[in-house]
Amino acid sequence: MVATLYVCVTCLAGEDRETVPRAGRRLHDALADAQRLQDELPNFRIVEAECLSNCNRGCSVALTGPGRWSYVYGDLDEALVDDLLTGASRYAATKDGLVPWRERPVIFRKGVIARIPPFPRPV
Ligand code: FES
């Protein structure tokens, strides 16, 4: 695996704090289930995270990988699972995390919260 999709499992996405499971947990589980059902072996892994500091625009995920730009996305929900898997797979297929704009799912174009440069090489 060359990339990781972190999924915030504590996001409420505007729901009541007592709602169980939380919206973020439902998104994570839907992503993991859908990835398991794919015919091809995944080129990224899905990992739980607790809060990506984007709580007002949850559900939230982050994409990262060695030598790659990293991204935080928000305003997500379970209906976007297919687009998220497609976008993460395209991200993992790059060397630097820079997917051409037209190849990014709409949710990756509109829902990006932040992007972080790759970790610098030692000087
Ligand atoms: S609880 Fe999900 S970003 Fe904070």
Image (spheres, rainbow, N blue to C red):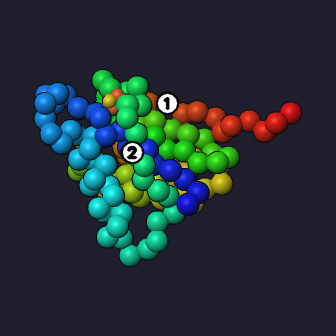
Q: Quadrant of residue 55?
A: top left
Residue drawn at (60%, 41%) of the image: 69
Q: Quadrant of residue 6?
A: top left
Position in image of residue 83 (x %, y %): 35, 54
Residue drawn at (74%, 36%) of the image: 120
The type of residue carrying mark 2 is Glu
Q: Quadrant of ligand 1?
A: top left
Front-most of 83 and 27?
Answer: 27
Position in image of residue 18 (x %, y %): 13, 30
Rendered position, 84 above or below 52: below
Q: Which residue is mark 1?
A: 114
Q: Secondary structure at mark 1?
A: strand
Q: Is residue 16 left or right of residue 29?
A: left
Position in image of residue 14 (x %, y %): 19, 28
Q: Residue furthest bottom?
A: 39
Q: Which mark is residue 48?
A: 2
Query: Marks 1 and 2, Cα distance to the nearest angstrom?
Result: 19 Å
Q: Is residue 107 left or right of residue 101?
A: left
